[in-house]
């Protein structure tokens, strides 16, 4: 499937909200949930504007992964951009109907290529120990696992094991 990454903007709010709602149950099988409030369009709209503000301030850079017809198939983001140290953290999620098609791998390749334009020279990532697909995507894109730790999820109170990765550009 041909995909491209498109920088998050105001006009994507409605389609992105639908994408998040449609994939909520699927996402929450492997990543901590975002809380019930996130799935109210009013709250979502506020959070969407906060993300756009973060992007304007160059703290983060958010992208929608779209197919050739412009349908949102996933998200990929660089957050906590530190221009002094050249570091950022990557996160991504692919919609349930679009998994196992190489989309996360291709989107991460595209993001790695544009990261230097954002003064990012090292990308860090973390994923839960049971998210094997994400681990494979990171390794395939040259990330190395650098540590493991346990955290208590703020949303569920569950103890989760996280694998931490890094890639120098």
Image (tube, rainbow, N blue to C red):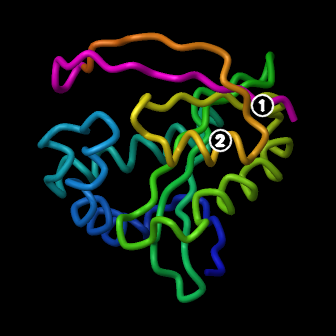
Q: Is residue 128 visible?
A: yes
Could you tell whether 167 is left or right of 104 in the image? right
Residue 105 or 17: which is nearer the viewer?
A: 105
Let me know if residue 167 is in the magenta part: yes
Could you tell whether 154 is left or right of 91 in the image? left
Residue 135 or 72: which is nearer the viewer?
A: 135
Q: Is residue 56 visible?
A: no
Secondary element type, mark 1: strand
Which residue range is magenta in the image? Answer: 154-169
Q: How would you rate the neighbour count of disc 1 (Cα within 10 Å): few for under 14, some for 14-19, many for 20 or more?
A: some
Please tell me which residue is depicted at 45% across the width and 52% down the height of the picture.
93
Q: Furthest-bottom residue in view?
A: 69
Quadrant, the C terminus: top right
Marks 2 & 1, CB-CB < 8 Å contact: yes
Residue 19 vs 53, above or below: the answer is: below
Please tell me which residue is depicted at 39% across the width and 48% down the height of the picture.
49
Which residue position is annotated with label 2?
138
Cα–Cα span, label 2 and label 1: 9 Å
Residue 151, percent from left and from top: 35, 12
Quadrant, the N terminus: bottom right
Residue 147, percent from left and from top: 60, 13
Please tell me which residue is depicted at 57% across the width and 56% down the height of the picture.
63
Which residue position is annotated with label 1?
167
Residue 108 vs 56, above or below: the answer is: below
Q: How would you rate the neighbour count of disc 2 (Cα within 10 Å): few for under 14, some for 14-19, many for 20 or more?
A: many
């Amino acid at each position: 499937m041909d995909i491209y990454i498109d920088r998050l903007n105001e006009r994507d709010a409605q389609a992105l909200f639908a994408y998040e709602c449609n994939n909520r149950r699927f996402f929450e099988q492997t990543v901590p949930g975002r809380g019930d409030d996130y799935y109210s369009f009013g709250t979502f709209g506020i959070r969407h504007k906060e993300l756009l503000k973060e992007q304007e301030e160059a703290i983060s850079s958010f992208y929608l992964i779209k197919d050739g017809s412009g349908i949102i198939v996933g998200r990929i983001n660089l957050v906590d951009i530190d221009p002094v140290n050249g570091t950022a953290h990557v996160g991504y999620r692919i919609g349930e109907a679009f998994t196992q098609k190489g989309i996360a791998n291709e989107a991460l390749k595209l993001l790695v290529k544009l990261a230097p334009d954002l003064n990012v020279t090292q990308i860090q990532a973390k994923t839960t120990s049971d998210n094997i697909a994400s681990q494979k995507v990171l390794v395939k894109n040259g990330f190395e696992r650098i540590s493991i730790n346990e955290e208590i999820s703020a949303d569920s109170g569950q103890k989760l094991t996280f694998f931490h990765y890094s890639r120098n550009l």
